[in-house]
Structure formats: structure tokens, C-alpha cells
Amino acid sequence: MQALVYDRNDGAWEQTRGLKKTEVQTPTLNEKQHPADADMALIRLRYAGVCGSDRSVWFRHAFKRLIHDSLDTQNSDIRIAGHEAYGELIALGSAAEKKFGYKLGDMFAIESHMVCGACYQCTVGDAHVCQNQRILGFSVDGCFAEVMKVPAKLLWSIDPSRIREEVASLLEPFGNAVHACTVKPLQGKTVAILGCGPIGMFVIGLARSLGARQIIGVEPVEKHAKMAMALGADHVLFPSLEATTLFEHDPDISSKIRDLTGGIGVDIAFEMSGYNISLNNAIHSVRSGGDVVLFGIKSGNFVIETMEYIIMNGISFHSIVGRLLWDSWNIGYQILGDPNNDLQEKIYTILLKQGEGTIIPFGSLTSDIFEKAMESEPKMLLKMI
């Protein structure tokens, strides 16, 4: 079958870029040879979402150790990329069939984090930070392929009459936004979203659906800012691109946010970009006693301008990784599938632009097409069949 892979035989990590489309062996289930296949499923992919982390692999910005260590363990040189998946069940192990009752032809989105179920975190209800987790597309083969093999326990059943297939393929990243938006109640609250990439846009739509009183975006890219407004932001502010340092907050942004909130500051600031300056913007934009939700990820050290300000103003921090299993999935599915809620349609028409330039047929995919779409669109999908 055809797959989009990282192959370390192509050269040193730092001296290469991209993923290559190549023939790989189609996965199978064979319980006689591999008893663990009794708990596995084969999914024929319909759509696969392209994430910012896939971009990081493409440009070799992150995840080298995670990928290479797993390849060493598995005695392999090739990793099929991709972790935002939607497709059709075409084979199911005997144990999984008895446990879950799934039927061939059923449609599923897929959780990307394979948790162990046995570590301390898993046993106390914090499986989203499992200490032994493996991640599709990074530490095991992912969904940029015609068929993928996954543990059946990762499948989330989809009713295509409730949620259109293109949006169903985004339930995994949408779950990140759900996790972020359910740390604190949003009903009647003022919120700021600093960084309106795909997950930041999901947060805007969710904040509107969950009853936020005022939604303020902060985003330097005009195209993203327009999408943020269309998805439900009341205001979008443009940060200065001429900061005096890489970490000090932009006083114009914090001042404007306080002006928009009667001099108080927002109840909750969502830091979605992963930049040091954005973190300090969030800290200085939230009210005393407010909350900062941290989702943006960057490696290395960050500078906080003044710890005294945080302590004396009683500001709380919440770090978000992955999805709460399975609470985030259930909430996200209910919100998107609610016929009285237009968020699903907004995601398809505004973020995905009804597929115009955002949905790429896998059969005609080339490296140039893939990279151009990643550079021009905040979110793109691969149409696998």
C-alpha cells in the first residue's frame, strides 16, 4: 500500500526535510502468529488530518528523539506519519469483537495516544499523562496510509449522519480544545485566546458554544484573524511584530484587553501559540484571581517577567496535553453533533473552506503540494480514498 513516511535512511535528521510517499507492507491481523492481534483492528482510512506536529516533523523542528528511539526499539527505519484519523473498520481481532461488539463497515475516529492502563497515572484517572504512552505517527505507525493497524480500544464510533466525515477526522485535535475549555467553566466568562491557529480557532468556537460572554483573539496573521472572527470572536487584536525582547509582554495588547473588559482583564487566558512573549501577554491580560491555560508547546527555557506579579495577583496555571479519556471525546462529539449548534458547519465552511485548497487527494499528493498546503492553510486534510 501507499504511505507517507519518515525514513531515516534518507539522511541525517538535521540535513533533511519532508516525508516521502512510498510502498509499504499492508498491515494484517494474524492471531496464530501474533496473539496480540486479538485486540487489534484494521481501519481503511477515509481522511487524515495534518497537525502542527506533523509540520514539525516535516521541517525537523521537533520529535527526533521520540521517533528515533521508537525505531531503534522496533528495529525499523521507517515511520508512517499522521495521527488524526477517520475511516472504516475492515478487520477486527476476536477479543476486541467480543469486548466491543463493533461491526465491519462501522466508521471511527481514532485516539492517538496509546496508554498502558497500568501506571500510577492511568490507575488514578490521569491516563492522558500515562508514563508509558505511545503516540500514533511518532512512536508507532500512523494514519498517512491506506490502511492502519491500531488497538481497538482507541476507536471512537462515528455516526456519519450526525457528523460529516471531514469534521469527524478532526475529533482528535478538537478534543485538545475541549480539554482546554473544560478546565474552568466558561459560562458567562470573558476569555482571551492568544494564538489563533487551528486549536485556538476550535477554542474560540467552543467558548462561544459553552456560553462565554466575551471572546478576544490575539493573532498576527490576518487570514487567521478573519477566520477567528467568523468562528465567534468578538474582537481580534494584532500583536506587535517588533518586540524589544523575545519574552517581555506587549503592553499594547494587555492594555487593549483590559480596556475591552472594563479595566479588569479576562477571566481566562488561553496561551495557544507556545511563544515566550505570548505567555507573558496571557499573564498580563488575565484579571487578578484569573486563570491561564497553557497549550502551546515549545522546547527550551521560558522567561516569566515577574513571579511576584503572578503570586500577588493569585493567577492560576493549567497545563493541557492530549484529551481526557474519554470525557473530552464525549463532550466534543456531543457539541459537534448537536443539531442546534452550528459549530460543525463553521469548521467545515470557515476553517476547511469546504475543501477548497484544504483537502488534498492522497493519490495525487506530492511533496510540493503537501508543503504548499501546509504553508498556506491553517488546517488541511488528506483524502485517503
Image: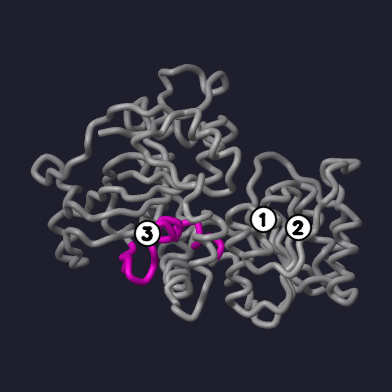
Considering the numbered disc 2 on the image, is that residue within a helix, a strand or a loop?
strand
Q: Quadrant of the C terminus?
A: top left
* Real-space Cα separation, disc 3 to disc 2, in angstroms: 30 Å
Question: What span is colored magenta in the figure?
Answer: 156-177
Q: Is residue 163 one of those drawn in magenta? A: yes
Q: Residues within 10 Å of mark 1 (few under 14, many from 20)?
A: many
* Real-space Cα separation, disc 1 to disc 2, in angstroms: 7 Å
**Residue 293 in the image: x percent, y percent?**
67, 63
Q: In the rendered structure, which amino acid carries the disc numbered 1?
A: Cys
Q: How is the image coloured?
A: one colour
Considering the numbered disc 1 on the image, is that residue within a helix, a strand or a loop?
loop
Between 122 and 7, the residue placed more toward the observer is: 7
Establish if 10 lies above or below 352: above
Q: Reading the chain from its start, which is encountered first: label 3 or label 2?
A: 3
Q: Which mark is residue 165?
A: 3
Left or right of residue 285: residue 132:
left
The reply to whether discs 1 and 2 touch (Cβ–Cβ < 8 Å) is: yes
Q: Residues within 10 Å of mark 3 (few under 14, many from 20)?
A: some
* Real-space Cα separation, disc 3 to disc 1, in angstroms: 24 Å
**Residue 95 in the image: x percent, y percent?**
16, 59
* Eye-nearest disc, 3 or 2: 3
The reply to whether discs 3 and 2 touch (Cβ–Cβ < 8 Å) is: no
Q: Quadrant of residue 148?
A: top left
Q: Quadrant of residue 321?
A: bottom right
Q: Which mark is residue 218?
A: 2
Left or right of residue 161: residue 52:
right
Name the residue carrying label 1.
Answer: 196
